[in-house]
């Protein structure tokens, strides 16, 4: 019995000893797992530290960008202001606006400054016509010609169209027109006066009367006969107003 008990103890002890290596052999994978987990965490920590560094570096980067953006903003504002000034200069003239500081060529190719004309003549009349030597334009031009003796006592008279200098010269000579005909193919002044027919071409029959360099009457899209009659009346009305104030 004692022998059996001893052998049992030995066998149980052996089994215990055998179990321990198995348990211990199971330990290394756990250690490896922990180690690999530790490595992954370290990489994540390193990425996190990089993100923190980048985020911490952003304020200084932002400050430099903000300074440059401030400069860009100021430049943009200046551009907007200059554009705004350009728009105001290209804005269509209305009654009460000053005569544009523009020079155009007459039928002889001579430069005519509108501002200078306004300084030399208290009243300036400009009538616009679509095309030289056409029927309606001829009636309008000849109507101002026939009333020129009365008009020239008080005002300077000009015709204007998009025709060339040579076409204006032929028109003047053909119908014996006593005033200058201004050539403006670009239609810049005509655009300011609100008489562009389309964006690409054409002039609307019109007339404008300036007094002391200020637009007093603006007649756009009228017949030749109305332009002549109303233009003359407006000049004489201004003369009466001047006489009342003097």
Image (spheres, rainbow, N blue to C red):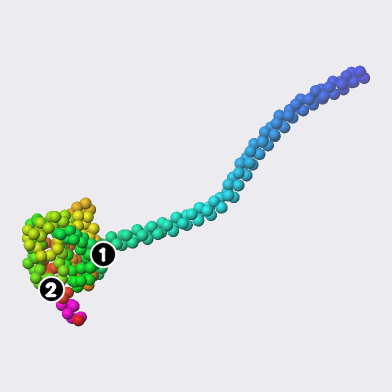
Using the image, determine if residue 84 lies above or below residue 35.
below
Which quadrant: the N terminus?
top right
Using the image, determine if residue 17 lies above or below residue 81.
above
Task: Say which label, 1 or 2, has the lower sequence index.
Answer: 1
Report the disc number at residue 153. Answer: 2
Regarding residue 95, the answer to whether it shows in the image is: no
| Label 2 CA crowd tier, 10 Å (few <14, some 14–19, many 20+) | few
| Residue found farthest to the right | 2
**In the rendered structure, are the residues bearing label 1 and label 2 in contact, judged by CB atoms less than 8 Å apart?**
no
Secondary element type, mark 2: loop
Name which quarter of the figure residue 155 lies in. Answer: bottom left
Distance CA(mark 1)–CA(mark 2): 24 Å
Question: Residue 165: percent from the left, percent from the top?
Answer: 16, 56
Which quadrant: the C terminus?
bottom left
Q: Nearer the viewer, residue 174 or 14?
A: 174
Q: Is residue 94 magenta?
A: no
Report the disc number at residue 101. Answer: 1
Residue at image location 88% in from the left, 19% down from the top: 7
Q: Which residues are magenta?
A: 240-245
Secondary element type, mark 1: loop
Question: Residue 3: percent from the left, percent from the top?
Answer: 91, 18
Using the image, determine if residue 146 lies above or below residue 66.
below
Our reading of the magenta stretch's main secondary structure is helix
Question: Residue 244: percent from the left, percent from the top?
Answer: 18, 81
Residue at image location 13% in from the left, 68% down from the top: 231
Name which quarter of the figure residue 187 lies in. Answer: bottom left
| Label 1 CA crowd tier, 10 Å (few <14, some 14–19, many 20+) | few
Name which quarter of the figure residue 216 lies in. Answer: bottom left
Query: Is 17 displayed left or right of 192 in the figure?
Result: right
């Amino acid at each position: 019995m004692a022998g059996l008990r001893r052998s049992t103890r030995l066998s149980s002890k052996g089994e215990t000893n055998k179990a321990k290596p198995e348990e211990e052999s199971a330990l290394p994978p756990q250690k490896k797992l922990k180690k690999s987990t530790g490595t992954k965490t370290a990489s994540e920590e390193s990425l996190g530290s990089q993100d923190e560094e980048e985020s911490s570096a952003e304020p200084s980067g932002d400050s430099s960008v903000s300074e440059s953006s401030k400069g860009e903003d100021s430049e943009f504002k200046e551009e907007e202001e200059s554009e705004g000034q350009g728009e105001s200069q290209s804005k269509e003239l209305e009654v009460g606006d000053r005569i544009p500081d523009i020079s155009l060529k007459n039928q002889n190719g001579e430069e005519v400054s509108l501002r200078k004309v306004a300084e030399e003549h208290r009243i300036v009349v400009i009538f616009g016509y679509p095309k030289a030597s056409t029927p309606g334009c001829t009636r309008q031009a000849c109507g101002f010609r026939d009333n020129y003796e009365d008009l020239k006592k008080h005002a300077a008279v000009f015709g204007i169209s998009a025709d060339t200098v040579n076409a204006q010269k032929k028109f003047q000579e053909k119908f014996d027109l006593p005033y200058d005909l201004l050539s403006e193919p670009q239609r810049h002044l005509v655009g300011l006066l609100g008489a562009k027919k389309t964006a690409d071409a054409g002039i609307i029959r019109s007339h404008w009367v300036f007094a002391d360099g200020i637009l007093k009457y603006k007649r756009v899209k009228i017949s030749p006969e109305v332009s002549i009659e109303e233009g003359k009346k407006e000049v004489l009305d201004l003369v009466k107003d001047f006489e009342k104030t003097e």
